[in-house]
Amino acid sequence: MSGFTLNIHGARGSVPVSGPEYHKYGGGTTCFEIEIAEDRRFVIDAGTGMLRIKDSLPDDRPIHFSVVLTHLHWDHCLALPFFGPLFDPRNRFDFYGRAVGGMDIEEAIDRVMRPPWFPVNFRSTAADKRFHHFEPYMTFPIGDEFEIHPILLHHPDGVTGYRIRHNGATLVVATDVEHGVPESDAALRELARGADALIYDAQYVPDQYEAQKVGWGHSTWQQGVKLAEAAGVGQLILTSHDPARTDDEVDEIVRHAQAIFPDTIAAAEGTSIRVG
Ligand SMILES: [Zn+2]
């Protein structure tokens, strides 16, 4: 059977939240996983939602993680200091990302994961860690299972958008991203063309964006719908929910989006969907 299962571990933007008003879509920040095997994990972003993965790991054998990072804003790597498997010498982690601010991924994370901000340096964690840096627009493989095409998108400090091909299906990841810069918009439209699923940053609602949030680095469901239609994607997955957005409000966003693009859902923590 072609296609794959996408596990949604975290879909909140900016900062984790908790409370009864967030039960349906969850409070953990960005983390998605393409399911392969119990001891072989493919993870997109290391937001606090990644901590959920610990519950499904075997403890009797080594685990090999591939972690693809869109960017290094806090909400996309905050799970790492608290992710137990990183402290286990049997495990291997391959991190993929773009060098930013003159730093490679290892240095950038190590600068914030160290005393006095955290008791342990990232570099000194026990797992075997390897780092893979790439240039945007250069397709690369991960094992013989994944083909990855990265591009640069518009977001403060830059963000990588990914087109990920696995087992005959295609997922495009575009979080975080702000629309309105023609080169970035056109590149994303091309990246998403014909994809089975598109994960898109819908942190703001259109009125809120226009009134207060231009230049903050995020987009809206309305732009997601336009992009999904223009690129002919199979399914639109809205994510990066605003920290203040309640479940009822996310439901309302989905209703608006579905009226125009019926195959729209909002990413919900702890759920899985089939891609392809
Ligand atoms: Zn960001």
Image (cartoon, helix red, strand yellow):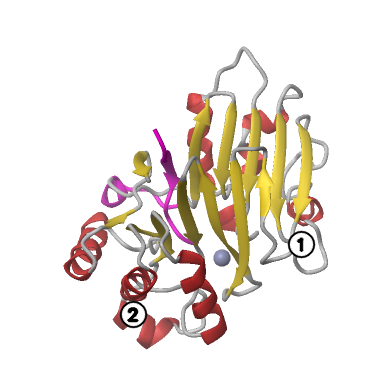
Q: Which mark is residue 99?
A: 1
> Could you tell me residue 219's position as x and y percent?
42, 74
Q: Quadrant of the N terminus?
A: top left
- Residue at screen point 70% across, 62% down: 138
Q: Amino acid at mark 2?
A: Gln
State which region is magenta.
1-23
Q: Position of residue 260 (x, y in %)?
A: 20, 71
Residue 57, horizontal then vertical, whole percent: 54, 23
Element assignment for label 2? helix
Residue 15 falls inside the magenta stretch: yes
**Helix, strand or loop status at disc 1:** loop
**In the depicted view, which residue is nearer to us: 183 or 91?**
183
In the picture, measured across the screen, residue 92 lies left or right of residue 43, that is right
Q: What's the residue at 38%, 81% (across, down)?
A: 209
**Quadrant position of residue 242:** bottom left
Mark toward the viewer: 1 or 2: 1
Asked if the magenta segment contains residue 34, the reply would be no
User: Looking at the rendered structure, which numbered label has been put on residue 208?
Assistant: 2
- Left or right of 68 in this view: 263: left
